[in-house]
Amino acid sequence: MPRDALLSYLRSIALIAEKDMRIYYTKPPVLMFGFLFPLFMFLSFSLGRSADLHTLFPGLAAMFVFFVASSVGPLITPWEKRAGTYERLLSFPVTVNTLILGDVVAGMLYGIFINVIILAVGMAAFGYSVSFTGVLIIAISLVLGAFCFSALGVLLASPASKNPPNVMLLSNLVRFPLIFISGIFVPIASLQGIARVAAYCSPITYLVNGFDLGLLGSTAIPLLFSWTVLIGFSVGFVLLARTFLRRNLMKGL
Amino acid sequence: MKRDRDDVIAVAGLTKRFGAITAVDDISFSVPEGELFGFLGPNGAGKTTTIRMLTGILTPNVGAVSIDGIDIQKHPIAAKMQMGIIPEMSNVYIELTAKQNVVLAGRFYGMHRKDVEERTDKLLQQFELSDRKDDRVEGFSKGMKQRVLIASALVHIPKVLFLDEPTSGLDVHSQRLIRAIIREMNDAGTTVFLTTHNIEEANTLCDRVGIINRGALAAIDTPERLKQAFNETQSVEVAFDKPTDIGEIERSGLVNRTERTGDTWRFYTDDPDALAKWILSFAERRKLSFTTLSIEGASLEDVFVTVTEG
């Protein structure tokens, strides 16, 4: 791609993301499913229990990243189709790829902003001593995880519905099982048989793994393998979202 | 695709099918630079599908569209850069201010922030929205939102402007303002492609009109030439000062058909001059006075009805 075309492509992605950030970050469904819901889940697993929060926090932080980053994507397309802004967006000199990546970047940044605070508070509260390498591992894992989960959110928005509550419902039907099959509440090394296989199928497992290594210094899966799988899931989600979105582009307009 | 040097829009054999339904069936036409072209048709005739294909939102099954010589299917971004588009089912972002909406549009077209802000301020002033430019669009009337939309489509000074029903459902003041802006843009050299249900709007604004019916292009010409081509719809309009039996006029042998609106009669005829003279003598015999007597040529509405009902 020529340099000017690449710059124009990146600028369009940034503009879509900027528009999404201005409009959708404060929408009630995003605040509900992206912030309040994981917060209450976090509190219900941490308050008044004898759980070892020092060990549990990396998994809970990964759950937070998952909920926050995947909460923006499902809302955007149905909301825009219902509000009548989607066709105008398509009329701008942008491609479907630009729209998808712009939405993914918006969800990813939302996941990163909120979880930097969550991680900082958690690290201070639970007394982790994290090296510079550990911080780097956490930062890279956070970026890759947030991108991956945001791409999943955009994929969940690609069906034709222009009714945001329907899409949010569908997204929760997919998100909840993923939470429970991941190694959030039980370390992956302790899982046996089909539970272990299921955990390997969830992208959240690989973020938990990265956070485990960064915060606790130990891990069940090699770090580079975890990052590669997160990148693989991201590419798969984006390609699937592109296929579905192209197929359903005009539905609901 | 054959294209004259000055054609800004060139359409060749455009066809769009949705399953078994052919929404647009092999239409071809061109719009030269600087023309204000009206695209008319009844509901479901294929107007919106056509404009969506012309603007690259929808891909045709067959056929090609070029905008200023750029094939929109092969180079959609380059072609879209030449256009300003107001789609039919379109709206502004109500969560953003009027200025933010227009600036966002300008930046999608690659304008620098400083340039786009200057141009936005100028446009919002022209559209009588200066004092509300920093207000969220949420509280705007439909007419004000439509003005913001049109400002967004004009911000990058497009070579060709596509408007799908731009004055539909607006109050008279907003309609007039938007028509004046369309005319002004056209006078400044912008080619305009306008779809509308409002026949009078097309009649007064457009240099040429195309009429689409059941997906096919049924007529295309200047409004005046279309009216001449459909001169069988000439009529004499009459209202008398008191009720009278008009059966004698209908039996004069000069009347093709009659329409009544309130106390006014409209007699369609092939020879309006002879019929008017006949009615004058009829009124003299019956000692009637006229409250209305006029000869009407074919209107664009008559042409539209004839073409789309035929």
Image: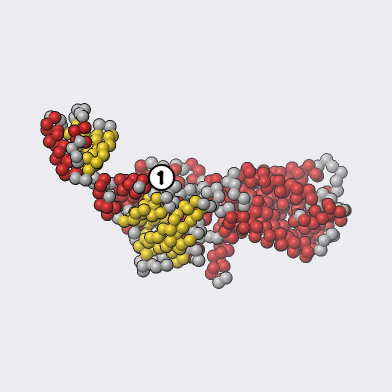
Q: Please, which colouring scheme is shown?
A: secondary structure
Residue B15 % position (x, y):
46, 58
Using the rendered view, name the quadrant where residue A27 is placed: top right
Q: Read off the residue under disc 1.
A: B168
Q: Is residue A142 above or below residue B293?
A: below
Residue at image coords 38%, 57%: B192
Can see residue A129?
Answer: no
Q: Is residue A223 left or right of residue B130?
A: right
Residue B80 % position (x, y):
47, 61
Q: Nearer the viewer, residue B103 or B202?
A: B202
Callout count:
1
SS at mark 1 in the image? loop
Q: Nearer the viewer, residue A236 or B284?
A: B284
Q: Nearer the viewer, residue A76 or A11?
A: A76
Residue at image coords 64%, 46%: A167
Q: Is residue A174 left or right of residue A165?
A: right
Dot 1 amino acid type: Ser
Q: Residues within 10 Å of mark 1 (few under 14, many from 20)?
A: some
Residue A68 % position (x, y):
69, 50
Quarter of the image with the N terminus of chain A is bottom right
* Chain of the residue on which disc 1 is drawn: B
Q: Nearer the viewer, residue B235 or A205?
A: B235
Residue at image coords 19%, 39%: B253
Direction bottom: furthest residue: A2
Q: Is residue B138 left or right of residue A163?
A: left
Residue at image coords 47%, 53%: B22
Can see residue B140?
Answer: yes
Q: Is residue B256 above or below residue A223?
A: above
Residue A6 % position (x, y):
57, 67
